[in-house]
Amino acid sequence: MYGTPALPADYDHLPYADPAAPVGGRIVTAEVGSFDSLNPYVRKGSVPWQLTYLVSETLMGRSLDEPFSLYGLLAESMETDPERRWVEFTLRPEARFSDGNPVTVADVIWSYETLGTQGHGRYASFWAQVESIEQTGERSLRITFNTPNRELVLLAGLRPVLERAQWEGVDFAESDGLAMIPITPGPYVVADFEAGRFVELRRNPDYWGWDVPFRRGTMNIETIRYEFFGDETAAFEAFKTGEVNLMRETNVARWQGQYDFPLVRDGSIVLDEVAHQRPTGMTGLVMNTRDPVFADWRVRDAMLLAFNFDQVNDAMTGGQSPRIGSYFANSPLGMTPGAPAEGRVRELLEPFAADLVPGTIEGYELPQGDGTAANRADLGRAMAQLEAAGWSVDDAGVLRDGAGAPFAFTILLQTGASETLSIAEIYAEALRRLGMEVTIEQVDSAQYTERIDALDFDMTYYRVGLSLSPGNEQYLYFGSEQADTGGRNLMGVKSPVVDALIGQILNAPSQEDFRAAVQALDRVLTAGRYVVPFYQWNVARIAHARDLHYPDHIPLFGDWPGWQPDVWWSDAGQ
């Protein structure tokens, strides 16, 4: 995106991969929830999220050591003009699908068009910015864009490629995701599964790309199996008994207090902490601003003030985890909490000053609680904000608006999310003290997915992972076009300021302008008070079988898709 990639054209392997790593072994992880599809490329069904990364293959691959740098995978070369109005890819002649058929230009063109028009919503935004896609040679194709957006040449290299012949005469969008598992050119194939219970991937020994530099030393594990459980307790018990051999732990208190079981004590399980330098993203309870109850920023401010972070943090992590400060905290892209906007960041925000929520330019910092279980100081401030927004408590202790309607809403959670449920219960008790009527509703994974897709919720769990290379996906998370159509914009933010800043990010002429635009976006989203944030994880805590290993060099992104299981290996057979 900026400057020159760190690795030379004749690089041998990624710096965080070991080309001498042995091949074999297995990784088994515990997943909470269920699945009813193995097709991650359509809207229909609930799919294990890992499939997109392990079964798919793309023209280019992302380096986890370099934000905004890609290297060739299916493509042996790429070319673009200085303005990045078009990009041309040349396919590697050896590229093959898992059934042995060659990857052709026709497959690529069909995949891009089909995914963009009939596939999952994540592909629609890119396709809407494509003016044309055409074959230019036996192994080459050119994509021309209709929008000035410098990131598009990178995104063009990150679309999955499917085998056109598999889908002849089939309705792609409505296909059965268990009866028709997509054929791909990726390094793993689905070897076995039972809907809702497990899915097992096998390393494809005939994978075409083992000698491609980007792939050397990666995808070393022979078998990757995902076991699905109804709740976190069952998943953890499976790990303690050895049924599962790798577990990511997000609860610091549990990490410190419950990982002293026999397999740890005898050395069969190793406990590792892996630091990273990527943004915290945002994790918490999101308010659906399409609901009139949450449309006023003062109400949302009251909701944040009522959340006693100290109490929740003590109960859930023993007070060990810092609160998330903003969407891009823990990175050079994040705003400085409480500090006023300065320099280029201020220049980007000032034209929109009249439309910004108080604190965006002046400085805003999330409330931390007053250090007591009662949290009276912040609850008092919350009530003042509610009154300013037209709410008051009647003689019966019920919070009502000017028309007499009660402040009532439901927190929608997925069954089995025990940690989030515990947090929601603590939070709901505080809100009831303000006179609110709060209901916590739990539904199974299928219903939850359906409800979220239909935007049928008042408040729910929210997690958006953000990277050091934010780009077009920000429209999916926060763009106005997504506000009424579902997708990832669960909060329903519909802001010309947000849209304009995302545009600035995409077309920044320099690293400095790019960073300023992201920091400005961070301010607008954080001061918008859309999410009640939880605690952050700046260190990944991974418990795993002692035969599983990874290279000493940890990439900038740390534990992120593309690192585990990608560069891990097993010496179980050594």
Image (cartoon, grey):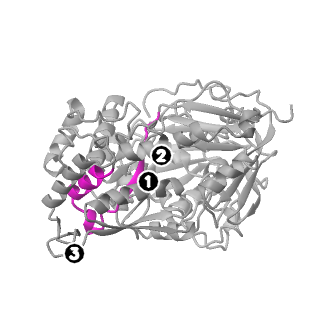
- Residue annotated with mark 3: 405
Res 84 quadrant in image: top left
Question: The disc labelled 1 sits on which kind of residue?
Answer: Ile
N-term mark: 1 or 2: 2
As drawn, the label of residue 423 is 1
| Above or below, comparing residue 453 to residue 151 in the picture | below
Where in the figure is residue 440, as x and y percent of width and height? 42, 66
Mark 3 touching mark 1, by CB under 8 A?
no
Which amino acid lies under the numbered mark 3 shown in the image of this protein? Ala
Q: In which quarter of the image is the N terminus?
A: top left
**What range is drawn magenta here?**
278-307
Q: Which mark is residue 316?
A: 2
Q: Which residue is drawn at 27% across and 50% down?
A: 305
Residue at the location (41% across, 47% down)? 312
**Residues at circles 1 and 2 in contact by the CB criterion of under 8 Å:** yes
Residues at circles 3 and 2 in contact by the CB criterion of under 8 Å = no
Crowding near the residue tagged with mark 2, few <14, some 14–19, many ≥20 C-alpha atoms within 10 Å: many
Comparing 14 with 251, the one in front is 251
Decide which of 447, 60 is in the foreground and name it: 447
Secondary structure at numbered mark 2: helix
- Is 155 positioned to the left or the right of 225 in the image? left
CA–CA distance in space, label 3 to label 2: 34 Å
Of the two numbered discs 3 and 2 in the rendering, the one whose residue sits closer to the viewer = 2
Q: Which of 464 and 21 is in front in this view?
A: 464
Drawn side of residue 157 relative to residue 475, left or right: right
> Judging from the image, what secondary structure is the residue with disc 1 in?
helix
Q: Earlier in the sequence, mark 3 or mark 2?
A: 2
Kindly state the secondary structure of the residue where label 3 is placed: loop
536 with respect to 266 (left or right): left
